[in-house]
Amino acid sequence: MNRFIGGALLLLLARPALAGEKGEPRTAAQQYQALVKEFSDAQQAWIKTYQAAKTNEERRKLLSSQPRPDKFVPKFLELAQKHPKEPAAVDALVWVASYSSGGPDSPHGKAMAMLMADHIQSAKIGPVVSVLGQQRPTPQTEKFLRAVLEKNPHRDVQGLACLALAQALKSSARGDQAVVKEAEQLFERAEKKYGDVKAGFLGTVGKVAAGELFELRFLSVGKTAPDIEGTDQDGVKFKLSDYRGKVVLLDFWGHW
Amino acid sequence: MYPHERSLVKTMEGKPFALLGINSDQSREQLKKVIEDEKMTWRSWFDGPGTRGPIASKWNVRGWPTLYVIDHEGVIRHRWLGSPGAAVMDRAIEELVRAAEAGKK
């Protein structure tokens, strides 16, 4: 049972494939579409095989052959490096940055550097920004998000950057109250200024920010825990406050 | 997870300690079955179906398991995303239980 709600890694980038004429050199856009289709096709085929599996043993074995982005990451990066001025280059870099992680020398790092140098103002970098908010932040991450927040003219991208930067700061704060304070201010700004901006399957920027603010203000070490009310496995009502006077280990769990 | 928690509950019998779960499985029936199969001797709120129940949502839980340790005065003293391991958990809880017992004198 270890499940962490990720960002774009759970989303399939669904784009219609454009067919090039047989024999003609393919444009960067066509090459991009072809790579996206290749990955998507591989995933679909695997899903079919997985769903057809009859036993848990079969399913367990299949997990190791699930198509991973790793094989495609270098191909997308190469495409962007060969055709840096094409619109498809941004798409390819966004793909690499969203589907991989790593330090400055990794394909992820190289894609981030290219996005930082040439595409900070692009309308297309929203997905990258969202994914960065969910990953372990690096100094490169923070720099990138600050630059996007400052320079990107598109409101929805700004909103995602404001939220992602707040999340990155919050998770890297390690008790540093100055960093926590900045995270709180950014969450407040995200909620007030960009509340309606869509944040993928998590809802809106406002909803995510409100949840994070609640956690910062009421659920951090040193705060008095809010009460919990609900029903147990037999439908019997009980509250957390029923156990005041005892040390309580609260365990959010699932068996899945 | 279950074996450590079973032994923790046993060790803490008679002491000011409670293990309370917030379960996000698909049904109360499923929860009851797991409790029976895994011999879970502690209570869980049923917060399902699924991971977007009212308690998990209010507590902004995004990863499972998420663990909180609350002292005998209701103050949050530890928060772990994922288990920090039995040794860390036991040490933290034992310290707070000793404080709770001292507080009652």
Image (cartoon, coloured by chain):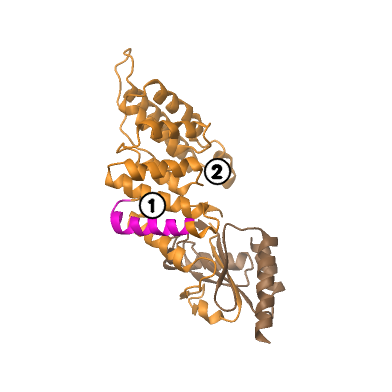
Assess disc 2: are there few (<14), some (14-19) or many (≥20) residues with their C-alpha within 10 Å of its C-alpha.
some
- Mark 1: amino acid: Leu
Q: Colour of chain B?
A: brown
Chain to which mark 1 belongs: A
Chain colored orange: A
* Nearest to viewer (mark 1 / mark 2): 1
Q: Which residue is mark 2?
A: A59
Q: Say if residue A5 shows up in the picture.
A: no
For numbered disc 1, what is the local secondary structure?
A: helix
Residue furthest front in the image: A178
In the rendered image, the vertical position of residue B47 relative to residue B84, given as above or below: below
Earlier in the chain: of badge 1 and badge 2, it is 2
Q: Is residue A32 left or right of residue B97?
A: left
The magenta stretch is A179-198
Q: Tell me which corner region of the image, top left, top right, bottom left or bottom right, holds residue A143.
A: top left
Q: Is residue B25 left or right of residue A85?
A: right
Query: Which quadrant would the N terminus of chain A be assigned to in this image?
Result: bottom right
Residue furthest bottom in the image: B105
Q: Say if residue B70 shows up in the picture.
A: yes
Residue A163, labelled with which disc? 1
Assess disc 1: are there few (<14), some (14-19) or many (≥20) residues with their C-alpha within 10 Å of its C-alpha.
many
Q: Is residue A231 left or right of residue B91?
A: left
